[in-house]
C-alpha cells in the first residue's frame, strides 16, 4: 500500500471519528457533524452550527489537536511523495542523458518486444553496449529498472535515432512488428551512418526480405522461418538438431561457442593450427576459420591450415580457457 493510499484512508477515518463524535456528544445530525469536523480539522474557523456544551468543547479541542496535526502530516506526505517522484525522475533523466552522451561503438535496438528482450539480455550477458529505442511507457519503466540505456520515441524518427547515438554506433537491430517500420528505420539509419551494420526482422511475408535488403539491411531474419525449420529438424534430424542446440547453448555446460578476431599481435600469426598450440595450451577446438582476405569460410580446418592476421576463428571450449586466449592475444 502506497503512502498516498494510507494517507487518504487515515484522513477518512479522522472524518468518521469526528462526525460520530459530534453526533454522539452534541446530538447533531450527520451533515452538521461532518461540517463541524471539516471546519475544525482544516482550521477554517467558521461559526458553530450547534450549541456545544462542555463535553462538545472538550471533544472539539481533542479533535483539533489530533485532526489538525494529522492533516498537516498527511499533506506533508503527499508533498514528499510528489517532490521525491519528480526529483527522482528528473535525476534519472539527467543520469540517462549523461550515459547516452558517452556511449560509443554500441548497438541500437529498435523495439523491446519479445524478440527485443531476448536480444538485450544476450547483449547484456556478453558485455556488449547497446541502446534501446522504445515508445511504450510501461516497457520503458521496465527497461529503466534493468538499468539498460533507453531513448523514448519512435525508432523511425531521425531525432530519436540521433539521440540513441546512431552516428557513433557500429550496428542497429530493428525488431519492431511492422515490415514497413523496419524498412523506414533501416533507410533512416543507413542515411545517417552508411557504415552501420543493420540486422532487421522480417515478418515472412512475400517480398519483405527483398524490400529490407533494398533499404540497406545487411542481414534479414524471419523468426517464423527459423522457428519452422528448427521444429522440422527436431523431427527429421533429431540428433543433428540436438548437436546444434548444444553448441549454441553450450554455456549451460560451462562451454562456449565463440568467434575471435585474430589481431596482428597474436603470437601464432602465420602458424599452422598444429603449431599454434590452441588445442594444447587452451584445450579449445577450432571449428572454422573465416579468411579476412576473401571472406571464405573454412569448416573443420586441417591441422596444416595457417592462421593469418585479421582472420576470424570459431572456437568451442570452456569459457575460462577462451577468455584466457583472448587476454593472451
Image (cartoon, grey):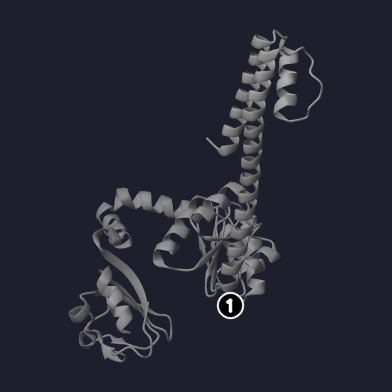
Q: How many marks?
A: 1
Q: Residue furthest right?
A: 47
Q: Quadrant of residue 25?
A: top right
Residue 120 image offset from top left, x and y in percent: 47, 59
Give the class, few, some or many, for how many residues have Cα within 10 Å of label 1's Cα (few <14, many ≥20). few
> Left or right of 61: which side holds 283?
left
Which residue is drawn at the image coordinates 32% and 80% (left, top)?
327
Q: Nearer the viewer, residue 310 or 206?
A: 310
Which residue is drawn at the image coordinates 28% and 77% (left, top)?
324
> Left or right of 59: which side holds 225?
left
Residue 310 image offset from top left, x and y in percent: 40, 85
Which residue is drawn at the image coordinates 81% and 21% (left, top)?
47
Residue 46 image offset from top left, x and y in percent: 81, 24
Is residue 52 placed above or below 112 in the rendered structure? above
Is residue 196 placed above or below 139 in the rendered structure? below
> Left or right of 326: which side holds 113?
right
Which residue is drawn at the image coordinates 52% and 50% (left, top)?
142
Is residue 22 placed above or below 295 in the rendered structure? above
Q: SS of the residue at dot 1?
A: loop
Q: Nearer the viewer, residue 240 or 80?
A: 80
Is residue 162 placed above or below 305 in the rendered structure? above
Identify residue for label 1: 195
- Regarding residue 267, the answer to whether it shows in the image is yes
Name the quadrant of the C terminus: bottom left
- Regarding residue 287, the answer to whether it shows in the image is no
Q: Residue furthest left?
A: 280
Q: Residue furthest top?
A: 27
Residue 193 image offset from top left, x and y in percent: 62, 75
Amino acid at each position: 500500500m502506497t503512502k498516498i493510499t494510507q494517507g487518504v484512508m487515515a484522513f477518512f477515518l479522522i472524518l468518521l471519528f469526528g462526525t460520530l463524535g459530534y453526533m454522539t456528544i452534541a446530538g447533531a445530525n450527520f451533515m452538521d457533524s461532518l461540517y463541524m469536523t471539516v471546519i475544525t480539522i482544516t482550521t477554517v474557523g467558521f461559526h458553530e452550527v450547534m450549541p456545544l456544551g462542555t463535553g462538545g468543547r472538550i471533544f472539539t479541542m481533542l479533535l483539533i489537536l489530533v485532526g489538525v496535526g494529522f492533516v498537516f502530516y498527511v499533506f506533508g506526505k503527499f508533498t514528499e511523495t510528489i517532490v521525491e517522484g519528480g526529483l527522482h525522475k528528473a535525476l534519472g533523466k539527467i543520469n540517462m542523458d549523461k550515459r547516452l552522451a558517452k556511449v560509443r561503438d554500441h548497438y541500437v535496438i529498435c523495439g523491446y518486444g519479445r524478440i527485443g528482450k531476448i536480444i538485450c539480455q544476450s547483449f547484456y550477458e556478453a558485455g556488449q553496449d547497446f541502446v534501446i529505442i522504445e515508445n511504450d511507457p510501461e516497457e520503458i519503466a521496465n527497461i529503466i529498472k534493468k538499468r539498460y540505456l533507453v531513448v523514448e520515441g519512435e525508432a523511425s524518427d531521425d531525432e530519436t535515432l540521433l539521440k540513441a547515438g546512431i552516428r557513433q554506433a557500429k550496428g542497429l537491430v530493428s525488431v519492431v512488428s511492422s515490415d514497413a517500420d523496419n524498412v523506414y528505420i533501416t533507410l533512416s539509419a543507413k542515411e545517417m551512418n552508411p557504415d552501420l551494420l543493420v540486422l532487421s526482422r522480417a515478418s515472412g511475408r512475400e517480398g519483405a526480405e527483398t524490400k529490407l535488403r533494398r533499404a540497406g539491411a545487411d542481414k534479414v531474419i524471419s523468426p517464423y522461418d527459423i522457428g519452422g525449420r528448427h521444429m522440422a529438424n527436431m523431427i527429421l534430424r533429431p540428433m543433428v538438431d540436438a548437436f546444434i542446440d548444444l553448441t549454441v547453448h553450450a554455456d549451460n555446460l560451462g562451454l562456449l561457442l565463440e568467434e575471435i578476431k585474430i589481431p596482428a599481435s597474436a603470437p601464432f600469426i602465420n602458424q599452422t593450427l598444429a603449431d599454434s598450440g590452441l588445442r594444447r595450451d587452451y584445450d579449445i577446438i577450432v571449428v572454422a576459420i573465416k579468411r579476412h582476405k576473401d571472406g571464405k569460410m573454412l569448416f573443420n580446418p586441417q591441422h596444416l591450415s595457417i592462421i593469418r592476421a585479421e582472420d576470424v576463428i570459431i572456437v568451442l571450449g570452456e569459457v575460462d580457457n577462451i577468455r584466457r586466449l583472448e587476454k593472451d592475444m
